[in-house]
């Protein structure tokens, strides 16, 4: 069984459209609803800073009905898309190394909810492994380009070393910055919607924390705010800040949907940058991706074929095991029925009874042999065909 993909992702879609389909609050309930409406055997949902993706096994993926404009991938195209995504070839920042971890997290969430199982886990592990091989072939194995590293570069080039930076959120991007910014001389403070989680990030690094409500009211004392939370609504609003007058404040909004209102850019002391800027399609970035995609194409084709072949082989094995279990149950029922008829076969002598048992045993053997020999086998393209 192969996955069907439903996706919204930049640069194919605007980030505003992608953000409309980001689900974090109540995700377990949504996962169960998506599985129910699609009839999927397994389902995994991934939301990153530039994409949302449903991976669906079985059923009808389109029944999820996320809205107009989505991209659907299946067959070889689906495997190729997953491989390119895992290797960072589909990212605005070529070689983005965060995707494998995000895939693992999405799988863990789906398994905990009970909507994903062994097939989803095998596919995700295969995709990550093949993606790492592709990185090595393209010279991306040691690359560390991501939104977080681009943000780090922006801060180090745009602020003095002793600048005060508030990091809002406790995800991978803010954790990365919390570890790197102090090394470069910045004064870093942590804030989060849940104070205990802010302590979990700040305490091991020896960093102070600040109440998020204080920042939302007045960011006094800070030269920059980097925010990357899963909040469904903006945390920083024009209404809260419009009466303030203060020195220049940089806001690096790495969240999707955004943590800060675009209207804040009206304030003369706010310099706001969001994901649209970090993921901008520059001529250089497009050229790099095009070059990498061309170099990767032969490998992607071969790897996609291998992954499809494995998926078909696993599906064939599962079908065979299921059919064997049903056949075994049927023969067991037949033998039990014969045993209940022993009284009506009282006229049979011992040799005839043994012959009857032999016929039943031989019948079982021939039935299982026929089942195995008639199973469809995958052809070189990964499709199942009958011999």
Image (cartoon, rainbow, N blue to C red):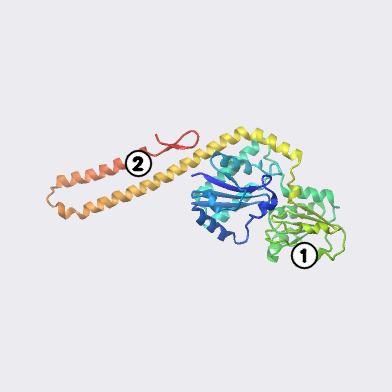
Residue drawn at x 83%, y 48% as measured from the top left: 157
Q: Residue 129: x, y in percent?
A: 59, 42
Quarter in which the C terminus is drawn: top left
Examine the rendered structure and indicate whether residue 96 appears above or below residue 342: above
Of the numbered discs 2 and 1, the one sitting upstream in the chain is 1
Is 352 placed above or below 209 here? above
Q: Which residue is mark 2?
A: 371
Residue at the far front in the pictured view: 68
Q: Is 213 placed left or right of 58 in the picture?
A: right
Residue that mark 1 sits on: 216
Left or right of residue 129: residue 354 = left
Q: Position of residue 293 (x, y in %)?
A: 66, 36
Q: Is residue 164 visible?
A: no
Nearest the viewer among 125 and 20 is: 20
Give the structural element (helix, strand or loop) at label 2. Answer: helix
x then y, percent, for residue 227: 74, 57
Q: Is residue 54 left or right of residue 367?
A: right
Identity of the residue drawn at 69% across and 65% down: 194
């Amino acid at each position: 069984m192969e996955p069907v993909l439903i996706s919204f992702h930049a640069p194919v879609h605007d980030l505003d459209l992608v953000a409309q389909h980001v689900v974090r609050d109540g995700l377990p309930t949504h996962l169960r609803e998506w599985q129910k409406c699609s009839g999927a055997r397994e389902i995994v949902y991934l939301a990153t800073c530039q994409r949302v993706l449903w991976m669906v096994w079985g059923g009808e993926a389109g029944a999820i009905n996320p809205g107009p404009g989505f991209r659907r991938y299946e067959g070889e195209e689906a495997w190729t898309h997953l491989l390119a995504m895992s290797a960072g070839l589909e990212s605005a920042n070529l070689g983005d190394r965060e995707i494998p971890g995000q895939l693992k997290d999405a799988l863990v969430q789906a398994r905990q909810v009970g909507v994903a199982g062994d097939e989803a886990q095998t596919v995700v592990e295969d995709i990550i492994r093949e993606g790492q091989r592709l990185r090595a072939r393209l010279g991306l194995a040691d690359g560390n380009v991501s939104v977080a590293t681009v943000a780090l570069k922006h801060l180090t080039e745009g602020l003095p070393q002793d600048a005060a930076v508030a990091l809002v959120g406790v995800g991978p991007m803010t954790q990365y910055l919390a570890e790197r910014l102090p090394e470069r001389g910045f004064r870093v403070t942590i804030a989060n919607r849940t104070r205990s989680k802010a302590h979990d990030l700040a305490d091991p690094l020896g960093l102070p924390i600040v109440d998020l409500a204080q920042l939302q009211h007045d960011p006094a004392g800070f030269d920059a705010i980097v925010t990357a939370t899963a909040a469904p609504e903006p945390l920083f609003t024009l209404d809260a800040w419009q009466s303030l007058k203060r020195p220049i404040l940089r806001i690096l909004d790495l969240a999707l949907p955004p943590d800060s209102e675009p209207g804040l850019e009206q304030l003369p002391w706010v310099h706001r940058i969001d994901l649209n800027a970090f993921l901008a399609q520059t001529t250089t970035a497009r050229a790099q991706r095009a070059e990498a995609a061309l170099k990767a194409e032969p490998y992607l084709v071969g790897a996609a074929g291998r992954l499809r072949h494995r998926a078909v082989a696993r599906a064939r094995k599962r079908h065979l095991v299921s059919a064997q279990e049903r056949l075994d149950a049927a023969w067991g029922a037949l033998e039990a029925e014969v045993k209940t008829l022993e009284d009506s076969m009282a006229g049979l002598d011992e040799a005839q009874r043994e012959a009857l048992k032999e016929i039943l045993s031989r019948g079982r053997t021939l039935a299982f042999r026929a089942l195995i020999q008639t199973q469809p086998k995958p052809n070189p393209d990964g499709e199942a065909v009958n011999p």
